[in-house]
Amino acid sequence: MGWWKIDSDEHGQIVNAVPGRDSADAMYNGDGPADLMGSALRKIDAQYVAAWGRSAKAEELREVFDFCLNGMLRLRESGHANAPAHPRAVASRPECGCSAIQSKGDQK
């Protein structure tokens, strides 16, 4: 699996990077993360096709990503990056911080 350094939040300049040799403080992308994201995007798109009879729009995919990323970042900031935000999150969405946002109303 290859890794490359990202020169900004928006553009990836293909410059090979080696874990353990290059600084962990820089931003990187890699074949593994890209493969995982590609698979996830295809699965999400299939859910839109099943529910709405059409592929997901680019903005819908961005919104799904942002929704889950924001939930994950909230968990990290709270010091509970590996713990579900709510007991039911274990059964519903253990792989994503999304459950933290969706379960908020249940905690009242």
Image: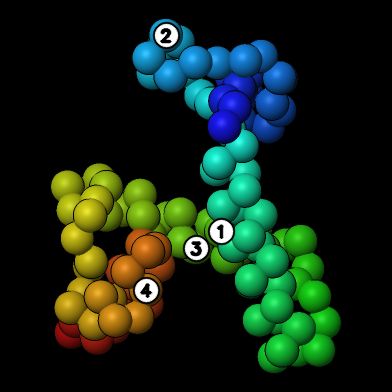
Give the secondary structure at mark 4: loop
Q: Which residue is mark 2?
A: 21
Vertical side of 55 occupied by 1: above or below: above
53 to the left or right of 66: right
Which residue is most to the top?
A: 21
Looking at the rendered image, the disc whose residue lies closer to the viewer, 4 or 3, is 4
Q: Are marks 4 and 1 in contact (CB under 8 Å)?
A: no
Q: Are marks 2 and 3 in contact (CB under 8 Å)?
A: no
Looking at the rendered image, the disc whose residue lies closer to the viewer, 2 or 3, is 2
Give the secondary structure at mark 2: loop
**Sequence-first disc among 2 and 3:** 2
Vertical side of 37 occupied by 58: above or below: below
Residue 64: name its quadrant.
bottom right
Q: Residues within 10 Å of mark 2 (few under 14, many from 20)?
A: few
Looking at the rendered image, the disc whose residue lies closer to the viewer, 4 or 1, is 4
Picture coordinates of residue 16, whole percent (x, y)? 62, 15
Q: Which residue is mark 4?
A: 93
**Sequence-first disc among 4 and 3:** 3
Q: Are marks 3 and 1 in contact (CB under 8 Å)?
A: yes
**Sequence-first disc among 4 and 2:** 2
Q: Which residue is mark 3?
A: 67
Seen at 24% across and 82% down, the residue is 88
Give the secondary structure at mark 1: helix
Q: Separation of disc 2 and disc 3 at Cα? A: 33 Å
40 to the left or right of 73: right
Amino acid type of the residue that numbered disc 1 sits on in the rendered structure: Phe
Amino acid type of the residue that numbered disc 3 sits on in the rendered structure: Phe
Residue 104 appears in the figure = no
Residue 99: name its quadrant.
bottom left
Q: Are marks 4 and 2 in contact (CB under 8 Å)?
A: no
Give the secondary structure at mark 3: helix
Amino acid type of the residue that numbered disc 4 sits on in the rendered structure: Arg
